[in-house]
Amino acid sequence: MKMASIKPLYLSSTIHQVHSRLASTFSFKSRYLCRTYGTLTQEQKEKIAEGPSLGDFIEGDFEVEQESHGYEGTLKKEKGIKRLRLPPWLKTEIPIGKSYSGIKKNLRSLNLHTVCEEAKCPNIGECWGGGEHGTATATIMILGDTCTRGCRFCSVKTARKPPPPDPNEPVNTGTAIASWGVDYIVLTSVDRDDLPDGGSAHFAETVREIKRQNPTILVECLTPDFRGDLEAVERVAASGLDVYAHNVETVSKLQKFVRDPRANYKQSLTVLEHVKKVNPDVFTKSSIMLGLGEKDDEVFQTLKDLRSAGVSCLTLGQYMQPTKRHLKVAEYVTPEKFNYWEKVGNKLGFSYTASGPLVRSSYKAGEYFLTNMVKEKRRESSLSSASTVKAGQTEETRL
């Protein structure tokens, strides 16, 4: 009886001693760290304030602290917060202008759809109106307006078996685009898992029709993964397009929570890698959303994986919940943090990195840059061909 009563007292005393030692240790470390920081030079303190560099990421895992951009509201979702309030940098003006109104009217008359409208893109006024660079852009969504998949971030309506594709859509699309006078067109589509080829032949025919009616226009195709069917990927890659885009959407860890189960990270990277194998001259492009709960080291790894897959151009933008039925925003990423990722993308070797809260995969400023990239490549190719012909003529003369 005496031993039984002693044991609890002994355990209680031991636990108390452990707690006291831990508290003493933490208190000492806290005082030590404060004194150590106080002995740093001003230059060293500024370096710490600037945050980790690209080299720091390579050597280990770091989290980049966000600045509030002068905003006093909550940026990160915490327990008890149902929904984050929209910060001021994500509020945009209502789209207006003749170009915007003209394109919208023409779309309705030809029964065409745009992802700009279906996905409620905040940049629609800038893109359709030409924006600051004057390069008017539109993103046409072909193969109907109903998707066979149900990704938790996307507001496009879904069905297991959507209506069949409109056989006149390639011609109507080419006719509409030729009349708009746009410089750069993006073709995208819903997923059509109900079709044997995923709609790839329809995709390729639309590109050819656009080029037939306006050979100078630049065409980007933002495609689905075609269930990993590489023949379907090749069909689109060989259609005469200028830029092949396919989005990984988010970091590897969050794929199963964000995308439809039929989509996955590895499959998307394989699509992008295969495009470069079958058409090395085409520019490839991908996009990821931030604010879904990803960590900085996961974003960095995603960027490295995309570069390893040969991706030329990258866009990063803020995820915004389209309706109450979709995934909630886990965090609003500040403009400063997006600027940081742009610098990281450039250091990793992307030809172009567009990173900002309102950036989307078909962001206007990116297309303006791509326009110049593609035109420059065409010019170099033309000069190279002319040089080859001239060299051949010189050789014939000598002989």
Image: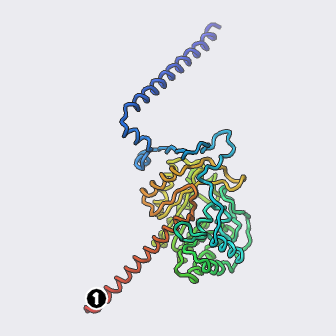
Q: Residue 312, image x and y in percent?
A: 47, 64
Residue in view at x 51 percent, y 54 percent = 302
Residue in view at x 53 percent, y 66 percent = 132
> The N terminus is located in which quarter?
top right
Splitting the image into 4 quarters, where does residue 199 fall? bottom right
Q: Which residue is mark 1?
A: 395
Residue at the outermost top position: 2
Residue in view at x 49 percent, y 45 percent = 64
Query: What amino acid is at disc 1?
Result: Glu
Q: Residue 83, image x and y in percent?
A: 68, 46
Above or below residue 98? Residue 36 is: above
* Residue situated in front as seen by the camera: 96 or 46: 96
Residue in view at x 44 percent, y 77 percent = 378
| Label tally | 1
Residue 195 seen in the figure: no
Mark 1 neighbour class, 10 Å CA radius: few under 14, some 14 to 19, many 20 or more: few
Q: Residue 193, image x and y in percent?
A: 67, 67
Answer with left or right where residue 28 lies relative to residue 335. Answer: left
Above or below residue 33? Residue 256 is: below
* Residue situated in front as seen by the camera: 196 or 78: 78
* Residue situated in front as seen by the camera: 63 or 214: 214
> The C terminus is located in which quarter?
bottom left
Splitting the image into 4 quarters, where does residue 261 fall? bottom right
Secondary structure under the numbered disc 1 in the rendered image? helix
Above or below residue 289? Residue 138 is: below
Q: Residue 7, image x and y in percent?
A: 60, 13
Residue 157 seen in the figure: yes
